[in-house]
Amino acid sequence: MTGTAQTTPPPRSALSPPLRPAPAKNKTPAWIWVVIVLVIVVVVAGIGLLGIAAVTGVQGTRGPGVSYDPDNAQPTGSRALAQILDDRGADLRKVRGLEEFTDAPRPDRGTTVVVSSTSSFNPGTTQQFRDRVQDADRVILIAPDNTVLTALGLPVTSGYGAGPSAVAAGCRTRGIDETDVAGFTPFGYVPTSPSTTACFTSDGTSNLVVVPRTAERPEVVVLSGEMLTNDQLAQQDNAGVVVRVFASSDEILWYVPFITDQVASEDDESDIPAAVGPLILLTVFAVLALMLWRGRRFGSLVAEPLPAVVKAVETTRARGRMYHRAGADARAAAALRIHTLGSLASYLGLPFDAAQATDALARPDWEVAVAPIETSDPSVTAIVIAVAGATRRDLGEVRALLAGPLPATDAQLVRFTAELTNLEKEVRQTP
């Protein structure tokens, strides 16, 4: 009997493993390498741009926002004065930063050196400035503080005095006649040596002080600076006085220091090799690339409730409401004033430690021991002057709000709160 032969596969043992396809080799997709290269390029470019922005931002642009700056056309700048000096044929040269100042020719007896942004001086640059201007004809310091005056060894201290809107010179010195009249600024200077000449004086404070030449330094003129701003230059005899004082020499070197200026010491040698920096940067990039290559891929984002964030302003206001409910209206008003001072200082770019003032407010002896010190704080005085200039309000009115007596009744507290709000709106120019 014939039949069709059938081929059957050999029987598989029950213990033999099932057949599985061979696993594919784990290869990194090409697009991942493209992403890694792009990320590295973006990171390098970002670091470079941040470095350039940091240097440019710290050293500053010319003019806008910088008080007494010769390129600032805003009310607090001095561009009008620089242009007048240039139109009158004065050889005016403006240098910015320590590098440009040291690259300029050394000032001699035919040069007047003008310095604005004096707060940017530090001990190293101050000493180098003293050595470099020793042979100059005259040095004019615009609105220096006590730190700069002490570092330069000048017998002058800053002060604060009240007076009329305009005051006569009352002195006779180079470029100034005793009949000259200039606008009076409450922030001024008090000479501590009889050899100095004080001009435009009221209430013991002078807006201009001339320190005579000695063997170690040239003649120095210290002035408050308001009379030379674009906003005040045309008032009274301000323009004539300032032009005569500045143009007393053949050449004028206007120096604007930067806060980043540093004087390197020849004795300071780094123990770290110069190649360590690039190696560290290369290591960071290598680790970043390795993380992108072999790192765990994240899944989809999961929404998660965030913790509550309480702003500092809400904390200050809450303390004010707490003091009010406790019947401490003076402390409530002080809390509101601290908030306003902190907000105005931040907007105007002035220093004020609101956190320290708020902590001091909780002291049991605040009304006796702390409050008088806070109202006489130099930072508060600077804010008062800046706010008065920005709002065109009377200086005494602004000082009464920000540094004067506090209200003691509910009605006074309500009126005080409204006045603080209106003042802050005027400074920020908001409705």
Image (tube, grey):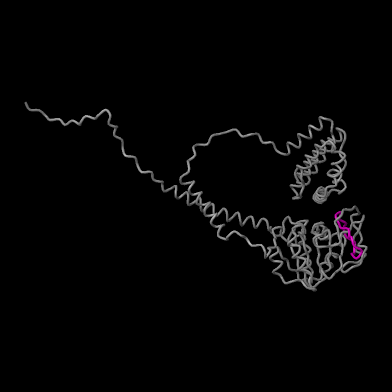
Residue at 48% across / 43% down in the picture?
295
Residue at 63% across / 55% down in the picture?
53
Residue at 73% across / 55% down in the picture?
65
Quarter placement of the C terminus = top right
Q: Residue 303 in the image: state x and y as whole percent.
A: 56, 34
Quarter placement of the N terminus = top left
Q: Nearer the viewer, residue 319 or 83?
A: 319
Q: Residue 103 in the image: state x and y as whole percent.
A: 69, 69
Does 414 appear above or below 120?
A: above
Q: Nearer the viewer, residue 355 or 343?
A: 355
User: For the view shown, which residue lies furthest in the front direction?
Assistant: 271
Q: Number of callouts in the render?
A: 0
User: For the view shown, which residue lies furthest in the left direction?
Assistant: 1
Q: Residue 187 in the image: state x and y as whole percent.
A: 85, 54
* Residue 227 part of the magenta-drawn span: no
Image: magenta residue range: 181-198
Q: Quadrant of residue 413?
A: top right
Q: Residue 117 in the image: state x and y as whole percent.
A: 76, 59
Does 246 appear above or below 190?
A: below
Does 37 appear above or below 304?
A: below
